[in-house]
Amino acid sequence: MNNKKKISITTCAVIALFFAGYKLFWNKSDDIILNGNVEVQDVNLAFRVSGRVNAIKIDEGDKVKCGDLLAFLDKDIFNAKLKFAKAQLNEASINLKNAEKNYKRDQGLFKNKSTSEKLYDASKTEYEVALAKLESAKATYEYMDIDLKDTDLKSPVDGVILTRNIEPGEMVSSGTVVFSIMPNTQTKIKIFASENVLSKIKYGDVVYVNIETMPEKKFVGHIGFISSEAEFTPKNIETKELRTSLMYRVRVIIDEPAPELKQGMPVTVSYKK
């Protein structure tokens, strides 16, 4: 065999090894399959005031926009309270005007030494009390006005109604959760990766998420966070061996809204489309 043939064979072998190594390198991440759980930050909604449910505008599964009216309470008692507060405010305003008028009159008389200091002080005190009562009446009116507005429950976010816990005619207490909304924000997947897997993944990598109930559907996401510190995995993760191993927390962010992915749902994350 001459030198040219030897060189040719050697070159072909090097090229073959290069492509084999290239393929092996780029296929490493294709074999990565990790298990995790969905993390969705649901928004729980409640009325700030107590009352009787008058009407409900939406149901479970409905899509809502920020500011949409979801439900409202009977407003009669709140309108009555606001009307009473307004009457008190008007009365306090009139009393202040009279007290101010008397105070200014007695102030002038006292300067001219036409009235006693005792009567002047009494007039001044009456004015200050009337002023305080007006401020109190204003605060009460504003509070009652806020209560009336809070009989309307509006969505604070764009999203999907997950649960509805009330019916028209029911009495609800302040703070009782009546709706749960999944906002149209990023759905996140929490997974744990060993050190050898960590060397094969990087921030921004495109991944695909599967759930058992919908094996034909893949949710596209990307690696959004890789912890720099190792930790023991939670007790509910996989096997005992895995739980007692030091792992690195990784977060996958789903690129599009995915209402099918529910809080805590187990999923499979892979690099294979």
Image (cartoon, rainbow, N blue to C red):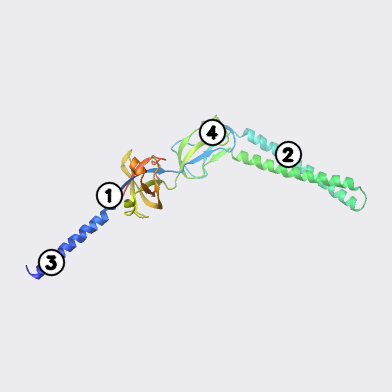
Which dot marks residue 31? 1
Q: Nearer the viewer, residue 88 or 135?
A: 135
Q: Give the labeled residue for mark 4.
A: 55
In the drawing, does residue 182 fall left or right of residue 209? right
What's the residue at 63%, 35% (across, down)?
78
Q: Nearer the viewer, mark 2 or mark 1?
A: 1
* Residue 30 in picture, x, y percent from top left: 28, 51
Residue pushed farthest left? Answer: 1
Res. 96 in view: no
Label 3 crowd (10 A; few <14 / some 14-19 / many >=20): few
Instruction: Tell me the CA gap for discs 2 and 4.
Output: 31 Å
Instruction: Give SS at disc 2.
Output: helix
Q: Give the labeled residue for mark 3.
A: 8
- Cβ atoms at labels 3 and 1 below 8 Å apart: no
* Residue 202 in picture, x, y percent from top left: 35, 55
If you read the primary sequence from the N terminus, does the residue marked by circle 1 or circle 4 appear first? 1
If you read the primary sequence from the N terminus, does the residue marked by circle 2 or circle 1 appear first? 1
Q: Quadrant of residue 95?
A: top right
Res. 9 in view: yes
Instruction: Give SS at disc 3.
Output: helix
If you read the primary sequence from the N terminus, does the residue marked by circle 2 or circle 4 appear first? 4
Instruction: Tell me the CA gap for discs 1 and 4.
Output: 53 Å
Instruction: Give SS at disc 4.
Output: strand
What's the residue at 61%, 35% (across, down)?
75
Q: Nearer the viewer, residue 194 or 69?
A: 194
